[in-house]
Image (cartoon, helix red, strand yellow):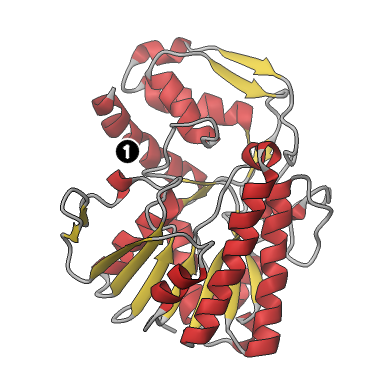
């Protein structure tokens, strides 16, 4: 079975984001034509500046196309899906706290936009629609590790939207024959994940604070645990899901993870240790504890056996390999920019 997409026309929605832009880079290196649809509400121009001249509004890289558009607008979705083989749908408003603050916009983008993308992909007769689902779907179910067929009640508006995406994808496969596969992302991290903004992910937030000599606050007692998953594993899974010829994998959702389990306390210790190699003063960094964050799942660890069996998935990076690569990238980039 092929493991990499080659010589195809691929649409990456949210392609200016952290995950999307990394997908774009790999796909271009593999001799694909790549189109990005992004409204830059959360995506960054700098993530695509090596591919696109934003000042003159023209591509720099061969086989790259950018549509500045909104997935909430059906005509933008239809334009983006024209002549596309595979859709890798990454566009969404992430963050549990953001969804609690503004559930209406979260629903409009994550549900309304998702539905419009499904309609456009169906009408364009794309080969397959791969979409970013979320581990937040597991909600309040206590079982560890998390298995795809056992979920609880969602704990946030964001989680509701991501579960609804799975229901819509199922209906579009059964009703229209649109091949869909969902990947439940578990705390993805790696190069280009930004520490900027109120809803930044925990790893870049901690790294940025440590580099800048700032204090770190952990929500809760620090025993909250996550299956942190390096970006290259996610790129691998998107490609495997696009190319699989296993009929049992179609119209399924898969945990996109490593099967690990790191507490926030151990994450802090690991980052402090790795960064202290660059600056010994970081070894003295302290941590403070604040209240638990509303809507958060306490523990998250994935069973990845389904993806291993049906998609031939084998993580290229475990947590330690991924966090080392990430710290090296952040030191070179955040230190340079501060």
Question: Percent x, y for residue 113?
Answer: 57, 63
Does residue 298 lie above or below 240 as drawn?
above
Q: Is residue 128 left or right of residue 15?
A: right
Question: Percent x, y for residue 153?
Answer: 84, 53
Q: Residue at 79% of width from left, 51% of height from top?
A: 154
Q: Residue at 41% of width from left, 50% of height from top?
A: 17
Q: Is residue 42 left or right of residue 247?
A: left
The foreground one among 184 and 106 is 106
Residue 5 visible in rendering: no
The foreground one among 244 and 101 is 101
- Tell how many labels: 1
Does residue 67 lie above or below 324 as drawn?
below
Where residue 286 sits, quadrant-wise, is: top right
Helix, strand, or loop for circle 1?
helix
Which quarter of the figure is the N terminus placed in? Answer: bottom left
Question: Percent x, y for residue 254?
Answer: 63, 67
Which quarter of the figure is the C terminus placed in? Answer: top left
Residue 102 visible in rendering: yes
Q: Is residue 68 left or right of residue 229?
A: left
Does residue 126 lie above or below 286 as drawn?
below
Tell me the residue that label 1 is attached to.
329
């Amino acid at each position: 079975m092929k493991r990499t997409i080659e010589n195809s026309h691929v649409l990456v929605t949210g392609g200016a984001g952290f995950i999307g832009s990394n997908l774009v880079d790999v796909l271009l290196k593999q001799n694909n034509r790549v189109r990005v649809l992004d409204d830059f509400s959360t995506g960054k121009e700098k993530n695509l500046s090596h591919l696109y001249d934003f000042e003159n509004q023209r591509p720099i890289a061969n086989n790259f196309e950018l549509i500045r558009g909104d997935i909430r607008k059906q005509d933008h979705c239809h334009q983006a899906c024209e002549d596309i083989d595979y859709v890798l749908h990454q566009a969404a408003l992430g963050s549990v706290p953001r969804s609690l603050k503004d559930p209406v916009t979260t629903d409009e983008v994550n549900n309304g936009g998702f539905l419009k993308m499904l309609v456009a992909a169906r009408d364009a007769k794309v080969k397959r629609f791969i979409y970013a689902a979320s581990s937040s779907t597991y909600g309040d179910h206590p079982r560890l590790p998390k298995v795809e067929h056992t979920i609880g009640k969602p704990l946030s508006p964001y989680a509701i939207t991501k579960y609804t995406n799975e229901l819509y994808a199922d209906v579009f496969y059964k009703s229209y024959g649109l091949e869909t596969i969902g990947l439940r992302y578990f705390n993805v991290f790696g190069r280009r994940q930004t520490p900027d903004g109120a809803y930044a992910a925990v790893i870049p937030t901690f790294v940025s604070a440590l580099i800048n000599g700032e204090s770190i606050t952990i929500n809760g007692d620090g025993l909250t645990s996550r299956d942190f998953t390096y970006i290259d594993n996610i790129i691998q899974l998107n490609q495997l899901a696009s190319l699989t010829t296993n009929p049992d994998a179609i119209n399924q959702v898969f945990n996109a993870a490593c099967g690990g389990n790191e507490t926030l306390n151990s994450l802090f210790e690991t980052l402090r240790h790795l960064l202290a190699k660059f600056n010994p003063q970081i070894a003295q960094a302290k941590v403070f504890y604040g209240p638990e964050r509303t809507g958060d799942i306490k523990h998250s660890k994935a069973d990845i056996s389904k993806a291993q069996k049906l998609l031939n998935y084998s993580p290229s990076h475990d947590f330690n390999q991924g966090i080392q690569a990430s710290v090296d990238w952040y030191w070179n980039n955040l230190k340079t920019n501060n």
